[in-house]
């Protein structure tokens, strides 16, 4: 148990809302046979107009247990509570309910800039990227070595995510689970 955090991306379909993407993600069966029995996403979510445009995105994922996924993972953190706090405050309107949330290029660039400031000691970490406590969220001390490790790994994740995302054709999401 603990704070697991995911940055993912998939095809952008202008007619779909974040709630549509979330519903499709939640309704997608684990087994490919079940998915085929439904004859694609329109069979699973018939009330969502344009959902069939995402059919080509459905793929098997998972290293240990295979499951169907609509998204590709482009970032993962575990117990990086300061980074989670940033997403909650800046992309989720302060609501932390493990919900799927859209993240823009500008959001990721802002977080990246904040990480650079902390790593280069150009700002106070407790003000720029303050840790947050929670059930199994990990250490909240900015002087703990893990804090800086999380910030440095976030820089690497964000640089790749920003560079390798086609922002016109793809949409990026953040979701945490705890």
Image (cartoon, rainbow, N blue to C red):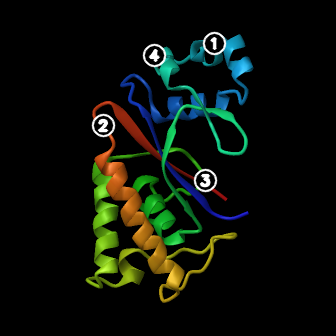
x and y percentages locating residue 65 in the rendered image:
73, 41
Distance between mark 1 and mark 4 Cα atoms? 12 Å
Circle 2 packing at 10 Å, graded few (<14), some (14-19), many (20+), is: some
Circle 4 packing at 10 Å, graded few (<14), some (14-19), many (20+), is: some
Which quadrant does the C terminus fall into? bottom right
Label 1's element?
helix
Distance between mark 3 and mark 4 Cα atoms? 27 Å
Circle 1 packing at 10 Å, graded few (<14), some (14-19), many (20+), is: some
Asked whether the residues under the numbered discs 3 and 4 touch, taking CB atoms below 8 Å apart as contact, a structural biologist would say no
Residue found at the very far bottom of the displayed protein: 143
Q: Earlier in the sequence, mark 4 or mark 2?
A: 4
Q: Earlier in the sequence, mark 1 or mark 3?
A: 1
Residue 166: which disc? 2
Residue drawn at x 60%, y 14% as measured from the top left: 40
x and y percentages locating residue 173 in the rendered image:
46, 44
What is the quadrant of residue 24 in the picture? top right
Return the residue at label 1: 43
Vertical position of residue 36 compared to residue 74: above or below: above
Return the residue at label 3: 97
Return the residue at label 4: 50
């Amino acid at each position: 148990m603990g704070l697991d955090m995911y940055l993912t991306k998939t095809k952008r379909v202008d007619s779909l809302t974040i709630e549509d993407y979330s519903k499709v993600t939640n309704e997608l069966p684990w087994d490919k046979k079940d998915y085929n029995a439904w004859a694609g996403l329109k069979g699973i979510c018939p009330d969502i107009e344009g959902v069939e445009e995402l059919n080509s995105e459905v793929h098997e994922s998972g290293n240990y247990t295979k499951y169907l996924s609509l998204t590709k993972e482009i970032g993962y953190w575990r117990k990086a509570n300061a980074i989670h706090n940033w997403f909650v405050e800046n992309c989720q309107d302060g609501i932390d309910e493990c919900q799927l949330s859209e993240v823009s290029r500008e959001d990721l660039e802002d977080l990246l800039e904040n990480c650079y400031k902390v790593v280069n000691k150009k700002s106070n970490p407790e003000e720029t990227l303050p840790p947050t406590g929670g059930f199994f969220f990990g250490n909240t001390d900015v002087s703990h070595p893990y804090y800086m490790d999380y910030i440095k790994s976030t820089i690497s994740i964000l640089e790749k995510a920003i560079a390798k995302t086609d922002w016109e054709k793809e949409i990026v999401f953040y979701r945490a689970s705890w």
